[in-house]
Amino acid sequence: MNDEAVMRDIARLENVRCRALVERDFDVLRELVADDLVHVHANGKLDGRDAYLHAVEEEIDFLSVERKDLNVRVYADVAIATGHLQQTVQLRATARRIPMSIMTTQVWRRGPDGWRQVSFQATNV
């Protein structure tokens, strides 16, 4: 697969990930994140895969998630995606809605089962 095809594939997978968050399709989300995921939230909180999945399943509702200007760079079996993400989440415990405008850096790794996200870093803008 050439770099252009990988770039398109990663952008497609990121759109699938965003849609899975809004639609609460956790089976799809589990398939997209690696067992060794490191997820750094915009508030600085660090989660591994299990804690991240627990949070999105039990604590947070994603009301909207929109990707803009995703840039993907490919290095053999690693792809780094950076770009703007706008989302609105609602905390289940308080029903507080939080609109977010963040820049993200994601690392995707290609393995025997395809591309999996291994790292996510968000920064408020």
Image (cartoon, helix red, strand yellow):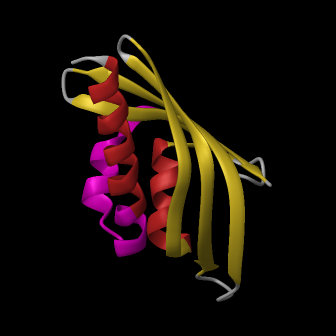
Of the 4 image quadrants, the one containing the N terminus is top left
Does the stretch in magenta take in 25?
yes
Picture residue at 63% right of the left edge, 78% below the top = 91
Is residue 57 positioned above or below 39 on the image? Answer: below
| Nearer to me, 87 or 68 | 68
Residue at the top extreme, as displayed:
76
Does the stretch in magenta take in 29?
yes
Please state the horizontal and vertical placement of residue 98, each as a whole percent of the image.
Answer: 70, 76
Taking the image as shown, residue 91 lies to the left or right of residue 114, namely right
| Nearer to me, 57 or 102 | 102
Is residue 120 something one can see in this rendering? no
Taking the image as shown, residue 57 lies to the left or right of residue 8, namely right
Q: Which residues make up the magenta segment?
A: 19-37
Please state the horizontal and vertical placement of residue 96, each as a whole percent of the image.
Answer: 70, 85
Of the 4 image quadrants, the one containing the C terminus is bottom right
Is residue 32 positioned above or below 55 on the image? Answer: above
Picture residue at 27% right of the left edge, 21% below the top = 111
| Nearer to me, 2 or 116 | 2
Taking the image as shown, residue 102 lies to the left or right of residue 105, namely right
Picture residue at 34% right of the left edge, 19% below the top = 3
Residue at the bottom extreme, as displayed:
95
Taking the image as shown, residue 73 lies to the left or right of residue 25, namely right
Is residue 14 positioned above or below 67 on the image? Answer: above
Picture residue at 38% right of the left edge, 24% below the top = 109
The part of the image, by quadrant, that contains residue 13 is top left
